[in-house]
Image: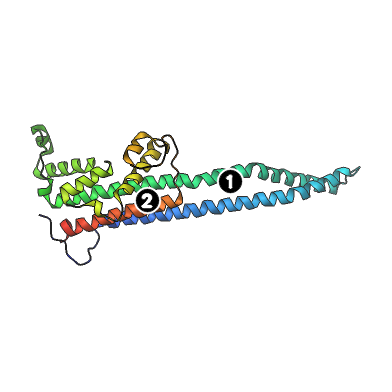
């Protein structure tokens, strides 16, 4: 039977500490990457402004040289130097705006990768905490599942059979739709994820958003619409991952994981 939840503060499990460490590293990377790209864009914009301001001056100087009937060696040297600088600034004026455009698109790619990694560490936590609970309370593991004689003989002793059953159950859960995860925790552990501060529909939407970016180039499909009830995004539209959206996703995922950890620790893992 689950242990009675104590009233005092419940220390997080090692699984949550691992999750939190990964989350902090992800947040630091995202923040650093955003700042780096912003800095590069500002530098390139400054180069373009400087080039636009300097070019007319140098072109006027070249015109003055061209008006002369004959150039001295010193004039030719100066003229060639100015010409080289004009060519360099022209390249900046033409090519750098394209580079700026590409750099401005890069942060969203970083955010897409960040969202994917966020879901990965969330799924890893789910697998770890479920495994820990099941191994600590084998009575919960009991179900109507049966093993063939061949499987039992192949696996060997009781410990190997238990580990096999736990791994099999754990493997099926993390990649399941969130509503299935909610039902599993309610049925198996008497933990109601619907009572978390993080609304289940928001977690569902975050996971669905990650999936369309990984599997469908960010394009909303019917599966997304079926999962995310009430979504205003039309079929075939692109779902942008903004900085604010990713920050919101991190808060939501962290909230639901912390809720699961507190409930699991209080009911099953408190020594």
Q: How many marks?
A: 2
Q: Residue at x 13, y 46 (%)?
A: 141
Foreground: 2 or 131? 2
Disc 1 secondary structure class: helix
Q: Residue furthest right?
A: 69
79 vs 106, left or right, is right
> In the rendered view of the protein, which quadrant contains the C terminus?
bottom left
As measured in the structure, the alpha-carbon distance from the residue carrying label 2 to the one carrying label 1 is 28 Å
Disc 2 secondary structure class: helix
Question: Is the Cβ of the residue at disc 2 closer than 8 Å to that at disc 1?
Answer: no
Foreground: 163 or 137? 137
Q: Residue at x 28, y 47 (%)?
A: 124
- Neighbour tally class for label 2: few under 14, some 14-19, many 20 plus, Cα within 10 Å: many
Mark whose residue sits in front, 2 or 1: 2
46 vs 160, left or right, is right
Q: Residue at x 10, y 32 (%)?
A: 150
Residue that mark 1 sits on:
100
Q: Earlier in the sequence, mark 2 or mark 1?
A: 1
- Neighbour tally class for label 1: few under 14, some 14-19, many 20 plus, Cα within 10 Å: some
Above or below for 151 versus 111: above
Pinpoint residue 119: horizontal percent, then vertical percent.
Answer: 34, 46
On residue 265, the disc is none
Above or below for 192 versus 210: below
Pinpoint residue 162: horizontal percent, then vertical percent.
Answer: 13, 44
Pinpoint residue 245: horizontal percent, then vertical percent.
Answer: 42, 50
Pinpoint residue 4: horizontal percent, then vertical percent.
Answer: 13, 60
Query: How does the figure colour the protein chain or chains?
Result: rainbow
On residue 249, the disc is 2
> In the rendered view of the protein, which quadrant contains the N terminus?
bottom left
Q: Quadrant of residue 196?
A: bottom left
53 vs 232, left or right, is right
């Amino acid at each position: 039977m689950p242990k009675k939840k104590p009233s005092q503060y419940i220390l997080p499990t090692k699984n949550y500490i691992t999750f939190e460490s990964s989350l902090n590293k992800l947040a630091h990377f995202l923040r650093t990457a955003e700042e780096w790209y912003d800095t590069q864009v500002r530098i390139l914009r400054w180069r373009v402004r400087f080039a636009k301001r300097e070019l007319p001056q140098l072109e006027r100087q070249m015109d003055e040289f061209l008006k002369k009937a004959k150039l001295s060696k010193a004039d030719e040297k100066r003229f060639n130097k100015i010409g080289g600088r004009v060519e360099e600034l022209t390249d900046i004026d033409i090519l750098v705006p394209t580079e700026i455009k590409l750099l401005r698109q890069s942060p969203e790619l970083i955010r897409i990768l960040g969202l994917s990694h966020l879901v990965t560490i969330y799924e890893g936590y789910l697998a770890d905490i479920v495994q820990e609970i099941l191994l600590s309370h084998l009575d919960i593991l009991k179900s109507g599942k049966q093993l063939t004689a061949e499987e039992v003989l192949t696996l060997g002793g009781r410990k190997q059979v238990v580990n096999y059953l736990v791994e099999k159950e754990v493997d099926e859960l993390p990649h399941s739709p969130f509503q299935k995860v909610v039902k599993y925790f309610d049925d198996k552990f008497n933990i109601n994820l619907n009572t978390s501060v993080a609304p289940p529909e928001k977690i569902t939407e975050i996971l669905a958003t990650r999936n369309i970016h990984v599997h469908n180039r960010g394009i909303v499909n019917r599966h997304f619409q079926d999962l995310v009830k009430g979504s205003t995004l039309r079929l075939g539209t692109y779902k942008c991952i903004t900085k604010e959206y990713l920050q919101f996703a991190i808060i939501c995922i962290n909230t639901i994981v912390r809720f699961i950890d507190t409930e699991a620790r209080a009911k099953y893992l408190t020594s």
